[in-house]
Image: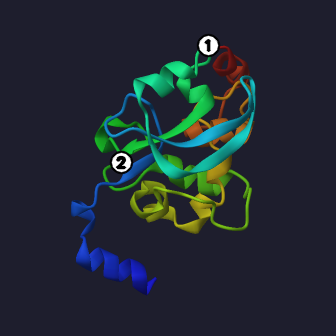
Amino acid sequence: MLQQQIVREIAPMEDKPLLCPNAQPDMEGSRIIGVIGGTVGTAKGVAFLNEHLAASDELLCGAAPARPTEVFRFAAHCEEWACRHYDGTKCHLATRLVQIMPIVTNILPTCLVRSQCRWFEQEGKPACIRCPQVMTEGYQPSEDFLRAALGEILPSGARENIARA
C-alpha cells in the first residue's frame, strides 16, 4: 500500500493516463495484451502476453475470418466519459466483475499494463484474479458475466438475444 501512495505522490492520478484492459482494437493507443484460448465460439480464457504488441492492421487482419476481439484481448486509453461503464470517478464494469465473477487464479497473472490499468488502480488484486476470464466477445457468456458486463439483472430471454447479436 505504501508503494502505491509513493507512486501517487510522484505521479498524481491526473498525470497518469489509465488504460482499459478490455478495449476495442480501434481505440486510441490500442495494444494486444492477450490471446484468447480455444476456438471461435468456444473461447476458454485469455493467455496474457509477455511483451508489448501494437494492434497493427497486419495483426488485426491476420485474425480473419474471425473478428480481432474473438482472437485477441486489447488494452487502450480509458475513454472515461465516452464509456457507459464510467461514472466520472470509477469503472463500474471493474466493480461488477469483482462483485459477481468467480476468482480464476490465486496469483496475479502476467500483465504488461497493470501499472496503468484502471481496473487494478481501482479494485487491486481482486480485479486481476478475475481478469483472465474476461473476453470482449463471447458466444456463450455466463449469466454472471452478462450481469457484470451489462450492469443489470437480465430479463428472461435476454441471454439468447445477446448471444445472437
Q: Secondary structure at mark 2?
A: loop
Residue 38 relative to residue 123: left or right: right
User: In the displayed structure, would residue 19 be above or below residue 125?
Assistant: above
- Picture quarter with the C terminus: top right
Residue 41 relative to residue 33: left or right: right
Amino acid under label 1? Answer: Pro
Q: Residue at x 67, y 14 (%)?
A: 164
Amino acid under label 2? Answer: Asp
User: In the displayed structure, would residue 31 be above or below residue 51?
Assistant: above
Q: Are marks 2 and 1 in contact (CB under 8 Å)?
A: no
Q: Residue at x 52, y 67 (%)?
A: 124
Q: Residue at x 33, y 76 (%)?
A: 7
The image shows residue 141 at horizontal and vertical percentages of 71, 32
The image shows residue 107 at horizontal and vertical percentages of 69, 68
**Mark 2 packing: few (<14 Cα in 10 Å), some, or many (20+)?**
few
Give the quadrant of residue 77: top left
Q: In this figure, which residue is indicated by the disc labeled 1?
A: 65
Disc number for residue 87? 2
